[in-house]
Image (cartoon, rainbow, N blue to C red):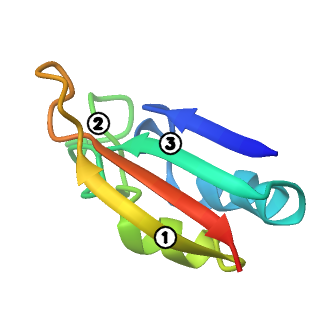
């Protein structure tokens, strides 16, 4: 089974992403993420554009503890805005 997430985890706070990845660790055999690995811009205050705490590559590595990242590269799409494509497999 493949878990696929494109451009929504980067919009989400790390504790919420960790909850989702907890389920992924127990169910998926592979993972594909298309995300800004440095995280989304930080909001100046709650309710403003951005996130309070960016979800970064370190959060994905921690949250996908039963997986190894086998590839991570910048998206070739010109509209991707520094988005990376990463592929993970269960270890």
Q: Do the residues labelled 1 and 2 touch (CB within 8 Å)?
A: no
As measured in the structure, the alpha-carbon distance from the residue carrying label 1 to the one carrying label 2 is 26 Å
Label 1 sits on residue: 69
Q: Residues within 10 Å of mark 2 (few under 14, many from 20)?
A: some
The mark that comes first in sequence, 1 or 2, is 2
Name the residue at 51% across, 65% down: 60
Label 2 sits on residue: 50
Q: Position of residue 17 (x, y in %)?
A: 61, 53
* Residue closest to the eye, 64 or 75: 75
Name the image quarter holding residue 89. Answer: bottom right
Which type of secondary structure does the marked residue at label 2 adopt? loop
Q: Where is residue 34 in the image (x, y as percent from the top left)?
A: 41, 40
Q: How crowded is mark 1: few (under 14 residues within 10 Å), some or many (20 or more)?
A: some
Q: Do the residues labelled 1 and 3 touch (CB within 8 Å)?
A: no
Q: Are marks 3 and 2 in contact (CB under 8 Å)?
A: no
Which type of secondary structure does the marked residue at label 3 adopt? helix
Q: Nearer the viewer, mark 1 or mark 3?
A: 1
Q: Residue 12 carries which label?
A: none
Which type of secondary structure does the marked residue at label 1 adopt? strand
For residue 38, above or below residue 61: above
For residue 16, above or below residue 67: above
Q: Which of marks 3 and 2 is in front?
A: 3
Name the residue at 29% across, 36% down: 50
Q: Is residue 73 left or right of residue 13?
A: left
Q: Position of residue 56 (x, y in %)?
A: 36, 62
Q: Which mark is residue 9?
A: 3
Name the residue at 55% across, 46% down: 32
As measured in the structure, the alpha-carbon distance from the residue carrying label 3 to the one carrying label 2 is 12 Å
Tally of marks: 3
Which image quarter holds the C terminus? bottom right
* Residue closest to the eye, 36 or 48: 36
Q: How crowded is mark 3: few (under 14 residues within 10 Å), some or many (20 or more)?
A: many
């Amino acid at each position: 089974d493949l878990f696929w997430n494109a451009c929504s985890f980067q919009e989400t706070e790390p504790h919420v992403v960790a909850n989702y990845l907890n389920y992924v660790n127990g169910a998926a055999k592979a993972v594909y993420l298309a995300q800004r690995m440095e995280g989304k811009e930080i909001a100046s205050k709650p309710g403003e554009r951005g996130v309070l705490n960016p979800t970064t590559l370190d959060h994905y590595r921690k949250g996908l503890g039963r997986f190894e990242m086998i590839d991570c590269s910048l998206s070739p799409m010109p509209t991707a805005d520094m988005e990376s494509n990463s592929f993970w497999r269960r270890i």
